[in-house]
Image (cartoon, rainbow, N blue to C red):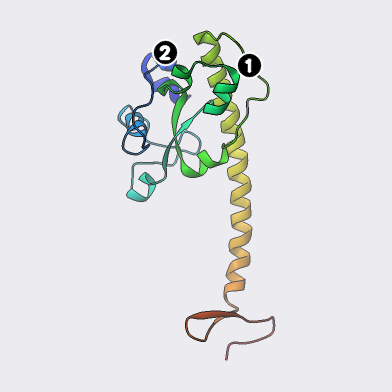
Amino acid sequence: MKPFDDYPKGGYTILPKLRGGNARREYGYWLVENGQTSCVYCGTSLVDSYEHWLLLTASHVIPATEGRRLGIPKQWRESYSNIVLACFGCSGFSNRYEVSWQDPKYYWDETEFFELRDRVFEEKADLIEEARNSEMSFYNDRVAWRQGRDARYRRNAPGGLAWLSKGQTEA
């Protein structure tokens, strides 16, 4: 299931252009009002707490710069048809995404645009999952390492922390 399935006409119609300049209060909120409440990539709820609400971003499936490069009409690349809700982390994992397998075109029809959008969504979802797994491994490795390291810190002087070398003990 794609997030567009819940959009008007199953996501296969050009929707209005984004309104406003803030994801949480304006254009992203439109998506919340229309049924998207979680990150489309990792499933984190973006409305169940204030802290999660602050993570809400509205992400272009086909990035705006890539849409311009490919010759996709502005009203399509800036419409809700090309926008999904994502958490800040997943959106960041897909920054600078390039559609390397598609050449620019002078003319696009809607069917070609939607096929490209769906293909890009699937590819970005896979890339984001890989990035999340890599980041989780890094985090898990560092947490275990840090727990041992933190035991070797001690308070020193007014408000500072000093490192204890291996073998030293806190005085």
Q: Residue furthest bottom?
A: 171
In terms of image quadrants, where is residue 98? top right
Q: In this view, does 37 lie above or below 169?
A: above
User: How far across and down, in percent of the image, does residue 1 sit?
Assistant: 48, 24
User: How far across and down, in percent of the image, does residue 11 sit?
Assistant: 43, 17
- According to the picture, the residue beneath numbered tag 1 turns out to be 104
Q: How crowded is mark 2: few (under 14 residues within 10 Å), some or many (20 or more)?
A: some
Q: In this view, does 76 lie above or below 39?
A: above
In terms of image quadrants, where is residue 171? bottom right
Between circles 1 and 2, the one closer to the viewer is 1
Q: In this view, does 122 lie above or below 111?
A: below
The residue at 48%/85% (across/down) is: 158
136 or 163, nearer to the observer: 163
91 or 70, nearer to the observer: 70
Q: How crowded is mark 1: few (under 14 residues within 10 Å), some or many (20 or more)?
A: few
- Which amino acid, by three-letter code, is at mark 1? Pro
The residue at 62%/61% (across/down) is: 142
The residue at 35%/31% (across/down) is: 27
Q: What element carries label 1?
A: loop
Residue 70 badge: none
The residue at 53%/41% (across/down) is: 92
Do the residues bearing badges 1 and 2 touch, measured as CB atoms within 8 Å? no
- According to the picture, the residue beneath numbered tag 2 turns out to be 13
Alpha carbon of mark 1 to alpha carbon of mark 2: how far?
A: 22 Å
131 or 1, nearer to the observer: 131
Of pointers 1 and 2, the one earlier in the residue sequence: 2
User: How far across and down, in percent of the image, does residue 80 sit?
Assistant: 40, 23
